[in-house]
Amino acid sequence: MRPVARKRRVTWRRVAKASADLIRVPVVASAIAVVPQVATGASNTAPATFMDAVEGFVIPEQVQANDPWMHIDLVSRNLVLLRGQRRVEAIPYIAYGKGGYRRLRMRGSQQTPVGRFRIQRVNHQSKFRTFLEFDYPTPNAAWAANAMGLLSDRTYRGFQAYREKHDASPPDTRLGGHIGIHGLGSSPEWIHKRRDWTEGCIAVTNNEIDLIERWLDIGSTVVIRG
């Protein structure tokens, strides 16, 4: 019997057109590895720590064995810091944009973008204590926005030129920018715990952003899942 070739698995994601109509865009899954659960000893009882209980998830292809990176789940509000496949720290609560989240975030929407990013800048003079800026819009986001008519061809060419020159994303397109993760600064922690309050960034406490900065730096990978 002749072997049957496997088909590549395709999932569908919904993205917004400029007219607010929705279209369906295929996304082909890339090769991934699953993060193993942390061993809890000889016993098979429930995990002893929050970090042991975090749901398994996939590792970005570009992350090497000893690379530090960050995974954020907006649904569960969990943030995990990893080194390769090994979990090193976990934060059980984060806040995000007042407008919710979306793969293609538009300027002024107050939404948090989801996807895969890298840290392109660190600002220690931020009013929110420390700000780690992501490279949103990414090249993939800009390409999709151009394909849907959200970015003109001229703007898209300008985006590509800026990325090539600065190795960073410009913040002045319709997709916005200056999205990242930061602390609270002088804001009260009770507001942070009560509602999502940012313009699109991820927010954690001041102690937690200090912890994150000790692990991550410019170039580190960040995955945000919604």
Image (spheres, rainbow, N blue to C red):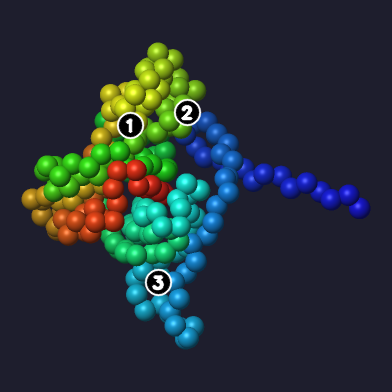
- Secondary structure, mark 3, is helix
Q: Is residue 194 above or below residue 103?
A: below
Q: Residue at left 40%, top 13%? A: 154
Mark linked to residue 52 = 3
Q: Is residue 73 visible?
A: no
| Spatial separation of the CA atoms under disc 2 and disc 1 | 18 Å
- Secondary structure, mark 2, is helix
Q: Amino acid at mark 3?
A: Asp
Q: Is residue 187 above or below residue 134?
A: below
| Spatial separation of the CA atoms under disc 1 and disc 3 | 35 Å
Q: Earlier in the sequence, mark 2 or mark 1?
A: 2
Q: Nearer the viewer, mark 2 or mark 1?
A: 1
Q: Amino acid at mark 2?
A: Ala
Q: Crowding at label 1, few (<14), some or many (≥20) Cα neighbours within 10 Å?
A: many
In the rendered image, residue 180, in percent from the top left (x then y), is placed at: 27, 42
In the rendered image, residue 152, in percent from the top left (x then y), is placed at: 41, 16
In the rendered image, residue 92, in percent from the top left (x then y), is placed at: 30, 63
Q: Is residue 62 above or below residue 56?
A: above
Q: Amino acid at mark 1?
A: Ala
The residue that disc 1 covers is: 168
